[in-house]
Amino acid sequence: MAVAAYLNSMKEQTDILVSGGGVAGLVAAIAFGNAGFDVICVDPTPPVTERDAEGSDLRTTAFLQPARDFLDLIGLWSSFDSYATPLTTMRIVDASSDDQITRDFVSSDISDRPFGWNLPNWLLRRQMLAHLGRLPNVQFRAGVATTSVFTRQSEARVKLSDGTTVLARLVIAADGRGSPMREAAGIDVKTTRFGQKALSFAVTHDVPHDTVSTEVHRSGGPFTLVPLPDHDGKPCSAVVWMEDGAEVTRLLALDPKEFEAEATDRSAHVAGQLRLATRRTAWPIISQIADRMSAERIALIAETAHVVPPIGAQGLNMSLGDIKVLLSLAQVKPDTLGDAEMLDAYHRKRMSPTKLRVSGITWLNRASQADQPMAQAARAMGLRALHGSGTVRKSLMKLGLGASG
Ligand SMILES: Cc1cc2nc3c(=O)[nH]c(=O)nc-3n(C[C@H](O)[C@H](O)[C@H](O)COP(=O)(O)OP(=O)(O)OC[C@H]3O[C@@H](n4cnc5c(N)ncnc54)[C@H](O)[C@@H]3O)c2cc1C
């Protein structure tokens, strides 16, 4: 009797269990909590919420217009607003030949708002944890992992690493590119490897960024500077520098002064001398797509469903698109949350746009890796042609913004 009572006390019921408290999982927990659902979100890795702390995520996220609108809708944007740096121009520089080409894509051509707003990922986590604290129906449990899932038509039973079993109407799998929930659901993935890594760090520089995000192409992948607020009184930008894996290993081993010199050279001096403002972190680059976006009582979102190289600020913006669609389906018929009809509709709505975007970005990444003169010439010619036609230029900009739609 005492044993049965003990086992029952380890069982909990909730509307939604979010597996994974990365940026996407935390947004999902807030979105559904804000809509009135009971949510438990678990993650074995406690979030790091200070820039200079060990393990902090120094990547930044450029939230594009649709993403900002969604964050507004779920009441979260006000927690980010005062830290966001607007991005009003996307500058593309092809520096693969002496005849350097620079082309600007200006947001005022298509909109009266900036393209996007840039925020550091460590700061997003800090702001979201504070926001979660104000939602009594959302629990975030750091240091706890999902270990297994068993589903039936009416619910999912998820075992947690602290011994608890959670009965949920819907499991949102946001536990990353190697997702244990996706694996437990038997959903396969297709992965493309590029042999590339991305270095992510922040720099100060002499030339003000004037809210221009600059992508410099040569070979190995783009070198992108994305505006941040001033640091120590100097203009500051986040950098994503993509290169072949061996080259990234070499760059990481350089002392800071040598590294700064190489980074400044690779940036084609567009912002003047670059100086490190943070440590350097490296991220493996792949494209990946899951075969399905859902299984019985389980919805895949974010990197659990799709991973793309960091080009054009698409990754997390696509993830917000997943959450937006899932939330709108849940709100139409809250009583049927997580049933087969809802999850099939989610799969149908998200699979095609996700496939299209993953293959488009995979192609763009291959083009930016090009190191043969012929391929580089074709890339430069493409940039001239795409920018030269006002209609094509505007369509491309609108296409880029569609990431979270
Ligand atoms: C260099 C770089 C720059 C980028 N820039 C941009 C950008 O400007 N704009 C943009 O939109 N996107 C960008 N992206 C993409 C974006 O950073 C990612 O899409 C996003 O961070 C992934 O978030 P996620 O929550 O899906 O996954 P993750 O951050 O991987 O989170 C998954 C979480 O699941 C947890 N987990 C693992 N196992 C379990 C388990 N068993 N139980 C519970 N939890 C578990 C992990 O601990 C982790 O916290 C960039 C990516 C890179 C590499």
Image (cartoon, rainbow, N blue to C red):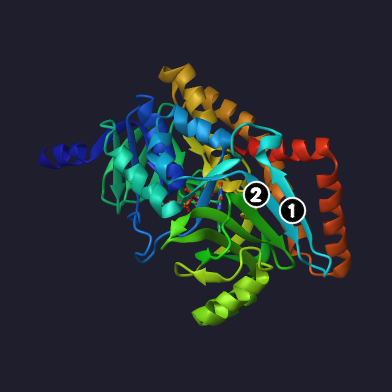
Residue 211 in picture, x, y percent from top left: 57, 49
Image disc number at residue 312? 2
C-beta proximity under 8 Å, tags 2 and 1: yes
Instruction: Kindly identify the residue that appears in the image at 35 percent across and 45 percent down.
Output: 127
Residue 93 in picture, x, y percent from top left: 73, 59
Number of disc labels: 2
As drawn, the residue found furthest toward the left would be 2
Crowd class of label 2 (few under 14; some 14 to 19; many from 20; radius 10 Å): some
- Quadrant where the N terminus sits is top left
**Mark 2 or 1, closer to the camera:** 2
Residue type marked 2: Gly
> Quick check: can you spot residue 209?
yes
Give whichever of 58, 95 is nearer the camera.
95
Looking at the image, is 369 positioned above or below residue 343?
below
Crowd class of label 1 (few under 14; some 14 to 19; many from 20; radius 10 Å): some
Question: Where is residue 294, by image quadrant?
Answer: top right
Instruction: Kindly identify the residue that appears in the image at 81 percent across and 52 percent down.
Output: 383
Kind of element beneath mark 2: loop
Residue identified by numbered label 1: 364
Q: CA distance from mark 2 to mark 1?
A: 10 Å
Give whichever of 257, 67 is nearer the camera.
257
Kind of element beneath mark 1: helix
Looking at the image, is 162 positioned above or below residue 170?
below
Question: Where is residue 224, by image quadrant?
Answer: bottom right
